[in-house]
Amino acid sequence: MDFDEIIALRKAFSSVRDRKKANIPPDLDEKTKRLKAVREFSVGNEDLLKRAIKKMEANNIEVVTAAGKDEALQIILEKTGGEKLVVKSKSNVTKEIGLTSALESHGIAAIETDIGDRILQVLKTRPSHPTGPVAHLSAKKIAEGLSRFYGKTVGEDPEEIVRSARDEIAGYIKKARVGITGANAVTAEEGSIVIAHNEGNIFEVMRMKKHIVVTAIDKIYPTVEDALNMLKVLCFHATGSLIPSFVEIISGVSKTADVEKKFFRGVHSPEEITLVLLDNRRTEMIRKGFRNLLYCIDCGNCLLHCPIYNTVGNHFAEEKYLGGKGLAYKSISEDELNRKLEFCLTCGKCRKNCPLAIDIPAAIRNIRSESLPEEMYYFLKSHLFWLYYNVRLRLVS
């Protein structure tokens, strides 16, 4: 256990909690209620999904559905068109299908353009938060890793770290012709793809000749207004800010009607947009009674308040599947109990602090135990585990 990482994680999480207290929107409850109603209506709504696909195709966005990981990877490999370099932005769905490693295994360099994700990629380490993936790493540790990778000294000043990573990423962006992003939402009324970001890198990634968007069927929303409301709730709970720096709303390839009001497509980049919509057992999860886990908007607020995650960090995780919710999702989607679920305290703080009030403890109890004595065993085991590492953490901090 790297206690320095846990201490850094706690410090980062504390900063977010403090920022949230200072920035609580007066209408947060209203926004949250609207979001919950929309998620309940949208997740698993096949008619809404069909409407969204039909409208996007009318907007000249190619939509391809993928039942599972292998199919999605094959589609993306074909769409890269033989290019040996792609640039991509942060996307939990591409992490879910292992896109970067799959591309690399086919001789394609896949460069992350978000600063945090590029640092993870260079240091070959694991994320600790969906929107702040290197929250567990100190500036000193990051600087040491980047210095080894670049073969030159990178100082510990956060600005120097960001500048070094940014300059390297910019070089790859200049060379690439294919950009891959995720999507926070896809809307049925407008046939639009909605993407939020703070760094500005998505400006560059989506302006490649070919733009591939990879997201999942649970990201469908009725309207752009519903998606923007979701982004406000997501941003507040993820960072303590009221709205992301940038919101992209993509409703088709570049086009103009300046001459005689006749549309001409492909004026600038992108000339092609492909949306890959992944199921990957989500439909099956709904049938099994775990629909509410798909309401999640990946704000990571559950992690900020999880006692075990704040004690052992991303040891209570598996790759991109962070904390109790992530491990529950992984267990359901793979039909195999992830043993790390044994360490969930089922204290309910995740449910209490989730904007969608997702009952993660109930899902975990359902997955990990079949009887009351078995659940009592896990309850005691998890609390002893938490107490042991909490004491050790106090001794070193």
Image (cartoon, grey):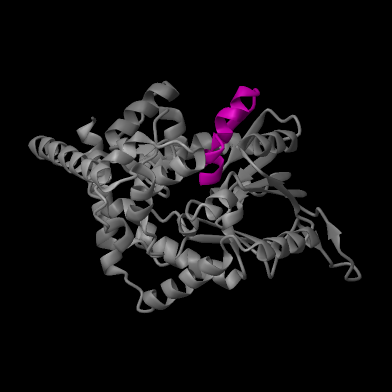
Give the image quarter of residue 49: bottom right
Tell me which residue sits at (33%, 49%) in the image. 365
Tell me which residue sits at (35%, 42%) in the image. 368
Q: Can you give x and y, in whole percent of width and height, for residue 192 in the image?
A: 67, 62
Q: Nearer the viewer, residue 92 or 42?
A: 42
For residue 95: magenta?
Answer: yes
User: Does residue 157 appear in the picture of this structure?
Assistant: no
Residue 309 in the figure: left or right of residue 206: left
Q: Can you give x and y, in whole percent of width and height, for residue 148 in the image?
A: 38, 22
Q: State the extent of the magenta-drawn residues as a range.
A: 90-113
Q: Nearer the viewer, residue 5 or 381?
A: 381
Give the image quarter of residue 46: bottom right
Depicted 261 relative to depicted 153: above or below: below
Depicted 62 relative to depicted 102: above or below: below
Residue 211 in the figure: left or right of residue 111: right
State the residue lying farthest toward the left.
395
Total label count? Answer: 0
Depicted 239 relative to depicted 99: above or below: below
For residue 316: magenta?
Answer: no
Q: Nearer the viewer, residue 226 or 87?
A: 226
Tell me which residue sits at (51%, 52%) in the image. 288
